[in-house]
Amino acid sequence: MSEQRHTIKDAAGNPVSVQLKRDKRLKKSWHWARQPDGSILMRIPARLPRPVLNGLLTQLAGMLEQQESMAVRRTDADLQARAEQINRKYFNGQLRWQAIRWVDNMQQRLGSCTRGGATDGHIRISSRMRTWPDWVVDYVIAHELLHRRHPNHSPAFKEELKRAYPLTERAQGFIEGVGFAQGQPLEEDEE
């Protein structure tokens, strides 16, 4: 694979470094992923002509802008409303929690639910997921809500989660794929 770097602008006009890798295995499709340092790794077909590459870089800038605008719209109030909807739809409204919010300080974990103490029932969801598909975010919310009934990842927890949230395996695969692409495993929460 050959490599080169380009710079595009994000929605705020800030430069974003794009590391380009020409991949002989790709024929028509192209893929991109955010790296831990904030840059973008973009894999393209090895024989992609330069004019087409310029179009893809423009398209990538548009995708980044769309992601950022979606992330801005997702607020803690929206997260609370989603949790309430998930609780009604998948758990018959039986689960109770105190608060749910986005947090910026989770590096490996995607969510956590505290049990006991002053913060009992507080659910935190990693803000790195704000731009992820709704069905993956909903899975993580369902996962954390279910910890109000099951404190750990017991067989009963896993069985109820799979039964309650129909996209469990698909969402777990998405999370594993993101972790693999970033070179670090992502954890839904602490074991």
Image (cartoon, grey):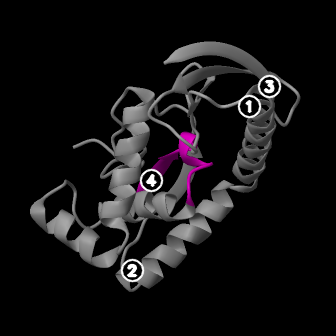
Q: Which mark is residue 90?
A: 2
**Which comes sooner in the sequence, label 4 or label 1?**
1
Q: Quadrant of residue 104?
A: top right
Camera-nearest residue between 95 and 14: 14
Specify which label sits upstream in the sequence, 3 or 1. 3
Q: Earlier in the sequence, mark 2 or mark 1?
A: 1
Give the distance between the C-alpha atoms of the residues marked 3 and 1, in whole angstroms. Answer: 12 Å
**Mark 1 element type:** helix
In the image, 99 versus 179, the foreground residue is 179
Image vertical order of residue 85 relative to residue 2, above or below: below
Residue of label 3: 8
What is the CA distance from the residue labelled 4 to the residue labelled 1?
46 Å
- Which x, y percent locates residue 113? 37, 51
Is residue 120 visible to the viewer in this orientation of the structure? no
Please identify the residue farthest to the right as the structure is shown: 13
> Hey, what amino acid is under mark 4?
His
Q: Are the residues at dot 2 and dot 3 in contact (C-beta closer than 8 Å)?
A: no
Residue under label 4, please give it. Answer: 122
| Residues at discs 2 and 1 in contact (Cβ within 8 Å) | no
Residue 170 is situated, as x and y percent measured from the top left of the image, at 36, 62
Q: Is residue 127 magenta?
A: yes
Q: Residue at x 78, y 49 (%)?
A: 69
Q: Which region of the structure is painted magenta?
A: 120-133
Between circles 3 and 1, the one closer to the viewer is 1
Q: Is residue 161 left or right of residue 13?
A: left
The answer, for residue 135, to whether it is visible in the render is: yes
